[in-house]
Each structure stands twice: as structure tokens, then as C-alpha cells.
Image: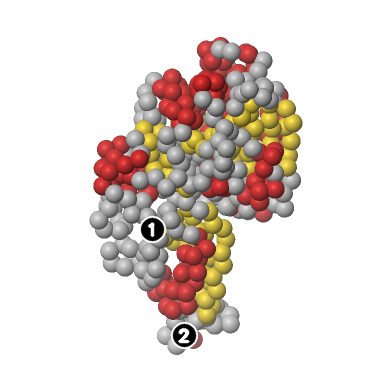
Amino acid sequence: MSAARAIAYALTHRKCFLAELMEFIRFPTISAQSQHRGDIARCARWLVRQLQRIGLDDARIIATRHHPIVFASRTTGPDRPTLLVYGHYDVQPVDPLDQWRSPPFAPTIRGSDLFGRGASDDKGQLFVHVKALEAWLQTAGALPVNVKCLFEGEEEIGSPNLLPLLSRRRGLLAADVAVVSDTRMLAPDRPAINYAERGALYLELDVYGPGRDLHSGNFGGAVHNPLQALSEMIAQLHDQDGRIAIPGIYERVRRWGSGERTRMARTGPSDDQILQDAQAKAPWGECGYSLYERLTLRPALTINGMSGGYQGAGAKGVIPGRATAKLSFRLVPDQDPQEVDRLFRSYIRKITPSTVRTVVRTISSAEPVLIDPHHAAIRAAHFAYRNGFGIAPILLRSGGTIPILNALQNVLGTPTVLMGFALPDDGMHAPNEKFHIPNFFKGIETSIWFMQALANAHRSNPLRTSSRAATPNMSAEAVP
């Protein structure tokens, strides 16, 4: 088989590939909003047709209690390794809509970028592998590896139905290696392989005061406003040094030696780069750590939104009966989301004023993950990036969360490679999300080379492992 022929096919079909990606983005697949359930189902059917058209077998929808999962496979032979390609086709909400320069589900090309919700997170990155599979099948008639595709519609809400599926369908989803492309590079000329992701815990905090909304003239100054009480409580979640103020929150945070921190300072983004990517004027957070370390080695608690009272134009003198905050933790090894949930609830009970009542709801959670950077599949990814982008990738930690990663390691026992093609300024989760079009095309070439490299690596040293791959207990010095 020839990777060069597959790449030649990809080069001549760039216009078609880009048009199909734009069609993919047009589906408003917002998993958090029930009104888009039909859009998600239509997108899943479209994706199945795509996988059937390019030549994959058994392309089908796996129904869940909520949004569907798309599965497809193609077997080359028992002597070939099996690659599981994971991605998600659901997207984040588009608010605030008035900040979009073009409609979020009307994909628009400006310069070298394709704008639209899901362009980089994760439809564009998912589609990289679909088009690489097409290039192989249309030129060689077969793939260099056995392939299983697993594309879900609930990643942005914590993968509540995918994670149980992994336990129930181990045989269907068994693979020697998994590849996930839902992460970032440092720059167009600085590709990266992630070896660590933070976990997550999403919560909602409700504060209840009077039994109904009140006239602020009649009751202002006599009744504790739930919005004010909520603000006072939120102000107690961090101390003056930027540390999370919840007792016990840092007890299980893994400490890393000088070797890891030195390597991170050498290869990772600088404070100035991070501030520039965030379009922020000044840093904030836990003292004693670089911004890159704060984003990856340390936990974070973020207020994602607050609501209550009047939100319309003009004035309304009202004391709301209820106020709500949406919060999220990003967790690091060896933190347990369930334990952090308990610590948060205990602390909220402690700081709740006697004048109001609070209720905490858990939305979703995911565990942090570490990936063995010495696995043969990581070396195959290095080879693929060198050929696809013309430069070797660096190893990076990520502050983000991909819920399936821990389950791939600890339920399926599948080593995973995080091959990201997004850029820091792609605006994931923000208005005007985009995908750098050259990265889309180079990503396809990189995926083609990755499959070839996996097949070559397997011939010399089989990728299969005999035992479940637990989260590696890496020391800082173990990371190259």
C-alpha cells in the first residue's frame, strides 16, 4: 500500500473535502439544548451516509437514551492492528449570538480560516480522519490497519451515554490503539501531541430567597437578595492569592518535580503567548506557577454563568426569588470528581447565609488522564506529524477535558494518541469559532501517514497489550 497515492488523492480532492466539511458544520448539533435533538439525529444519519460512501462496513447508528452514537468499521486482516478513531459531532451553544460576525451554522471562509460552530471542536478534526480513510480506500481499496469509528453526539454534555456503552460493548469497541483529535497545536508550524488532560466537574448552584419576586422599593434593604447572597458566596470560593478556598481541595493534587516543570517551560507556551491567545490584559490565578502550569498542573474553579432577576432592556425594580450560578472544576491527577463534589457541597453548606436556602446539582463529571508518552503509537504519531507538517511535534499537557479518555484506558485498556489540529486562537466554545484550513488539509495527510506508521510499527513489534492499561504513574523525569 502507498501512503503517497492516498495523499495525492487528498490533494486533488481538497475542494470537495472542504465543501463536505461545510455541509457537516451546517447542522446545529447543540447537545445541551433539547430543541436541537432532531438536528443531532439528522446529522448522525448524514455522518453514517458519509462513512458508507467512503467504503466503511457496518456504518450505523447506535441509539442511546438521548443523542445517537455513530459507529463504522473496516477490517483489513487479523495480522493488522486495530485503530479506534474517536470524535464528537455535537457542539457548544452559540451564545452570545450578537458577537458572531457570520451566522454560527452558516460556515464562512475568511482568509485561510473556516468559521462556524464546531469547525474545530470537533467536526473539523473528526473529519480529518474520515477524509484520510476515504483517501486510502479510494486509492488502495483497503486500509493499512483495521479501523473502527466511534463518533458521539454528547461529548459537550459529559458523554453520559457513551461511557456506559464502553463497558457493555467491550468486544465491539476493542482496539490496539485509539486516536482522538480534539486538542490544539501551539501554532501552525508547531504541532503537538497531548499526553495529559484535566478532568472536569460541572455543577449548578441555586440560591432561594423570598417565595416570589419582590418590589425592590417595598422590600429592598429588608430582604436578602438571592443574587447578592450568591455573589457573596462566589466571592468566598477563591482566596486573595487565586487559590480555591474549599478545604481539602488540594490534598490529592499530584506534585511534579523540577524536571517536569523545566521541560514544560522549555516546550510549552509562554505567559505572554497565553495572554495573547486569551486576549487578556493581565494574568490571574494561583501564585507560584506559570500560566501554563496553572492551566495544566493545577486545578481550577470557574464561574461559567449567573442568572436571576430581570435580564431585559431598561430598568425593573425587582428582588428575584431565585439566583443560579453555573460552575465548573478542572481537576488534575490524582483528584476524584466525586470527592471534589462532596467537598464543594460541604463548603457551600458552611458559607450559605441563614437568610437563604441553597441547592447544588451535579451536571456531569470526568476524570483526569495521563498517557504513556513512550508507547509505539506515540512514536508513530511523531513520524506522521513530521511527514504531514514538515516538523516534529512537541509533547504538551492540556487544560481541557475529554470525558472518554479515562474510560479508554481503564475500561477498554486501549492506549490513546491525542493528535490535535486546532490552534489556540480558534475560539473553541466562543463566538466566531474557526478552523485553520491549511491545518485541515495537513491533518488529513498526517492521519494518512499515521495509519501507515501504525501498520509498520505493528509488523516489527505488535501493539497489542496483554493487560488493561492503567493510568501511568509517570514521574516528571519519565517524559521526554
Q: Kindly identify which residue carries mark 2.
A: 354
Determine which quarter of the picture holds residue 61.
top right
Q: Quadrant of the N terminus?
A: top right
- The circle on residue 253 is 1
Indicate whether 114 appears above or below 8.
below
The x and y percentages for residue 276 are: 31, 43
Q: Is residue 82 visible?
A: yes
Q: Is residue 402 visible?
A: no
The x and y percentages for residue 106 are: 58, 37
Q: Secondary structure at mark 2?
A: loop
Using the image as rendered, state which of residue 130 and residue 162 is in the foreground.
162
- What coloring was used for the rendering? secondary structure
Q: Earlier in the sequence, mark 1 or mark 2?
A: 1
Q: Quadrant of the C terminus?
A: top left
Amino acid type, mark 2:
Ser
Q: Name the side, left or right, on which 147 lies relative to 221.
A: right
- The circle on residue 362 is none
Residue drawn at 41 percent across, 73 percent down? 233
Residue drawn at 44 percent across, 50 percent down? 198
Q: Residues within 10 Å of mark 2 (few under 14, many from 20)?
A: few
Q: Label 1 vs label 2: CA separation?
A: 33 Å
Indicate whether 120 appears above or below 19.
below
The x and y percentages for residue 103 are: 55, 41
Q: Name the side, left or right, on which 382 lies relative to 121.
A: left
Using the image as rendered, state which of residue 370 and residue 324 is in the foreground.
370
Tell me how many marks there are.
Answer: 2
Indicate whether 475 appears above or below 394.
below
Residue drawn at 37 percent across, 23 percent down? 391
Q: Secondary structure at mark 1?
A: loop
Using the image as rendered, state which of residue 35 and residue 110 is in the foreground.
35
The extreme front residue here reads: 466
Residue drawn at 44 percent across, 82 percent down? 353
